[in-house]
Amino acid sequence: MRRIVVAVLLSVMCLTAGDVSGNWSGSFKPNGEDSSHPLYLVFKQHGDKLTGSGGPNESAQHPMQNGKVQGDRLTFEVSAGKGTFIFDLKGAGDEMSGDLQFKGEGETRTAKVSLKRVGT
């Protein structure tokens, strides 16, 4: 009986703690560079599906594709300019961090991402 109660409590915690819907602001820092670049993401979570947009600020946004939520992990892509930004992030409350890969025009670059929820 105790195991059932613990399993139910863990399931409820996972369901209620994981909604990332909202606005997130932060930056990404390309590997091998000293400077970081602004990043603004808008998430809309529907179960394990993730939609929204991303860009350098709130007014310059590009649609998100292939968005998924698996536990505390988010994966999605944002096409902008002549390439695609591929995100692999982990959330912890009102903060999120992870990896970014840019693929475009015969090059691939990587970066680290750091975000905080806006307006909580």
Image: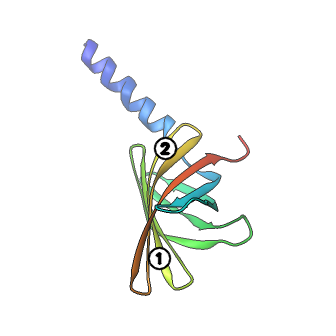
| Residue 90 on image: x %, y % | 44, 46
| Residue 93 on image: x %, y % | 55, 36
Residue topped by disc 1: 84
Cα–Cα span, label 2 and label 1: 22 Å
Q: Secondary structure at mark 1?
A: strand
Q: Amino acid at mark 2?
A: Gly
Occupied quadrant, residue 58: bottom right
- The structure residue drawn at horizontal position 52% and vertical position 85%, both measured from the top left corner, is 82
| Residue 85 on image: x %, y % | 48, 71
Residue topped by disc 2: 91
In this rendering, is residue 105 above or below 50?
below
- The structure residue drawn at horizontal position 59% and vertical position 40%, both measured from the top left corner, is 94
The quadrant of the picture occupied by the N terminus is top left
Give the camera-side residue of 50 and 118. Answer: 118
The quadrant of the picture occupied by the C terminus is top right
Q: Earlier in the sequence, mark 2 or mark 1?
A: 1
Q: Amino acid at mark 1?
A: Thr
Q: Secondary structure at mark 2?
A: strand
- The structure residue drawn at horizontal position 27% and vertical position 12%, both measured from the top left corner, is 2
